[in-house]
């Protein structure tokens, strides 16, 4: 891996901005679309640049190969379920809250990796990081301005969604020898297959009369925040490695708060700032323990 240059830090920042922007765009999308439809359209539009790249680079897409069951399972766990849960939860909470809750993914990954991998065991620094990060999340749930009896379950659902990303990541280790573009295209294809009948049966999106604002947000979520972001992630991984790319976790909650305030005028409370600081420091300790 090469030593990071200005262009590498610029691309990392762009990736963080794109992933952070997903949350307020999900919020805007919920004004017109149901959560299942948002997940479906996000996956459909996300598949376009990824499948297009595979065709352009002549990378074989193995969605229906002998490993189809892994692609199908990962598509359900890593895309269908979390995309739906996040969209469902964001209907009743601020998008900046979702960004902070989803930033806890590295903390959940640390706990699960201890039990399901051989070389990522818990140590003192990791324990400290996990406890600090989750303390920040717990503190956030005490913020009565943002979380109350009406949306407590929605906030909990978003936090729960982050666990599915972690489980999906662990499942991906089963096919880690395959090209990233192939894996992503294949799981997007299977996620689409799963969601076609579910969307048709539950929400009948053809009966909707969505606003232009919500439609633009859904298209952005798919093409940019899913498809393009994954391709950008591939480039960073290839050039700089996983450790460098993982630093994006520090930026997502910060950008999520800023973008939510700029585009949706969302409230930023003192407890939000304390929770974000705790999560970021917790992630720092977890990452530091791997060095």
Image (tube, grey):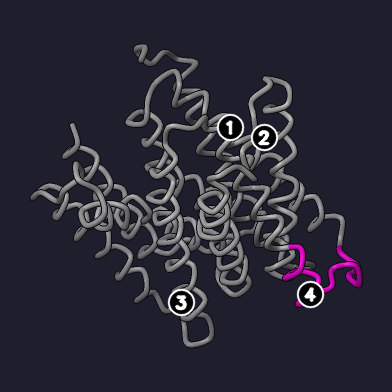
Q: Nearer the viewer, residue 236 or 56?
A: 56
Examine the structure image and report whether residue 205 is included in the region drawn in magenta. yes
Tag 2 residue? 50
Mark 3 secondary-structure assignment: loop
Numbered marks: total: 4
Tag 4 residue? 203
Name the front one of labels 3 and 1: 1
Tag of residue 181: 1
Cα–Cα gap, marks 3 and 1: 38 Å
Magenta stretch in the rendered image? 196-210
Is 266 placed above or below 200 here?
above
Task: Please rate how many residues cluster around mark 2, counting C-alpha atoms within 10 Å: few if below 14, some from 14 to 19, many from 20.
Answer: many
At which x and y percent is residue 113? Answer: 26, 52
Cα–Cα gap, marks 3 and 2: 37 Å
* Marks 4 and 1 close (CB-CB < 8 Å): no
Cα–Cα gap, marks 2 and 4: 27 Å
Q: Quadrant of the N terminus?
A: top left
Examine the structure image and report whether residue 199 is included in the region drawn in magenta. yes
At which x and y percent is residue 256? Answer: 51, 50
Tell me where residue 143 sits by quadrant. bottom left
Name the front one of labels 3 and 4: 4
Is 211 placed above or below 223 here?
below
Q: Nearer the viewer, residue 259 or 51?
A: 51
* Marks 1 and 2 close (CB-CB < 8 Å): yes
Tag 3 residue? 147
Name the front one of labels 4 and 1: 1
């Amino acid at each position: 891996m090469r030593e990071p240059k200005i262009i590498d830090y610029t691309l990392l920042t762009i990736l963080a901005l794109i992933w952070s922007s997903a949350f307020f765009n999900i919020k805007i999308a919920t004004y017109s679309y149901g959560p299942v439809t948002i997940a479906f359209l996000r996956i459909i539009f996300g598949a376009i640049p990824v499948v297009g790249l595979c065709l352009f680079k002549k990378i074989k897409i193995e969605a229906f190969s002998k490993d189809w069951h892994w692609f199908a399972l990962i598509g359900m766990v890593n895309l269908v379920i979390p995309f739906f849960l996040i969209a469902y939860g964001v209907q009743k909470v601020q998008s900046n809250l979702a960004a902070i809750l989803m930033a806890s993914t590295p903390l959940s990954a640390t706990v699960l990796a201890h039990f399901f991998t051989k070389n990522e065991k818990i140590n003192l620094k990791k324990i400290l990081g996990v406890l600090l990060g989750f303390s920040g999340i717990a503190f956030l749930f005490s913020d009565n301005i943002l979380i109350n009896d009406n949306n407590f379950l929605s906030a909990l659902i978003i936090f729960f969604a982050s666990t599915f990303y972690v489980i999906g990541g662990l499942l991906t280790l089963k096919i880690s020898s395959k090209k990233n573009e192939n894996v992503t295209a294949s799981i997007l294809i299977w996620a689409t297959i799963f969601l076609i009948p579910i969307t048709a049966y539950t929400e009948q999106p053809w009966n909707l009369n969505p606003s232009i604002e919500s439609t633009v947000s859904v298209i952005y979520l798919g093409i940019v925040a899913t498809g393009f972001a994954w391709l950008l992630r591939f480039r960073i991984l290839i050039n700089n490695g996983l450790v460098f790319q993982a630093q994006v976790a520090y930026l997502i909650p910060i950008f999520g708060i800023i973008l939510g305030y700029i585009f949706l005028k969302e409230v930023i409370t003192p407890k939000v700032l304390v929770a974000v600081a705790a999560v970021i420091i917790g992630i720092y300790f977890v990452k530091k323990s791997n060095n």
